């Protein structure tokens, strides 16, 4: 797929998270290190633009991988999930 089409399918502000019940066990996926890292980063707390900044993959490869994960029902759109708000404060 072309880069503009991938960008249209996965808007920069979209948040992706693992589906509760993937179509098949994740251990059956054969992933490169960069893909495995990107998959673990897609936890609902980061937007697609955040994921692109955090990966070593070229933009087109990263978007194609994320879209493939959506098609395979490994990842899906998520309402933005906030990271833990537990904080330690000192006075």
Image: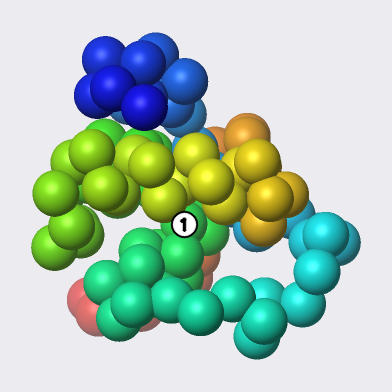
Is 69 rendered above or below residue 89? above
Other-residue count near label 1 (Cα within 10 Å), few / some / many at <14 / 14–19 / ≥20: many
Q: Position of residue 6 (x, y in %)?
A: 36, 25
Q: Depth check: 59 or 41 in front?
A: 59
Q: Quadrant of the C terminus?
A: bottom left
Is 4 rendered above or below residue 88? above
Residue located farthest toward the bottom when viewing the structure as drawn:
27
Q: Depth check: 1 or 33 in front?
A: 1
> Which residue, given by chain and number where applicable, does mark 1 sit on?
42
**Is residue 85 visible from the viewing direction of this image?**
no
**Please, which colouring scheme is shown?**
rainbow
Q: Position of residue 54 (x, y in %)?
A: 19, 58
Horizontal arrangement in the rendering, residue 13 relative to residue 21 (left or right): left
Give the quadrant of residue 7. top left
Horizontal arrangement in the rendering, residue 86 relative to residue 33 (left or right): right
Q: Residue at x 34, y 77 (%)?
A: 32
Q: Position of residue 42 (x, y in %)?
A: 46, 57
Is 61 rendered above or below residue 41? above
Q: Residue at x 67, y 57 (%)?
A: 74
Q: Secondary structure at mark 1?
A: loop
Q: Residue at x 38, y 42 (%)?
A: 64
Horizontal arrangement in the rendering, residue 8 relative to residue 91 (left or right): right
Q: Residue at x 18, y 41 (%)?
A: 59
Q: Position of residue 1 (x, y in %)?
A: 36, 27
**Is residue 30 visible from the viewing direction of this image?**
yes
Q: How many marks?
A: 1
């Amino acid at each position: 797929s072309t880069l503009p089409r991938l960008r249209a399918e996965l808007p920069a502000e979209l948040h992706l998270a693992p589906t509760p019940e993937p179509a098949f066990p994740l251990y059956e996926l054969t992933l490169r290190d960069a893909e495995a890292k990107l998959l673990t980063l897609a936890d609902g707390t980061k937007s697609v633009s955040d994921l692109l900044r955090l990966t070593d993959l070229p933009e087109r490869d990263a978007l194609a991988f994320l879209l493939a994960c959506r098609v395979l029902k490994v990842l899906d759109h998520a309402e933005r999930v906030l990271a833990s708000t537990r904080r330690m404060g000192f006075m």
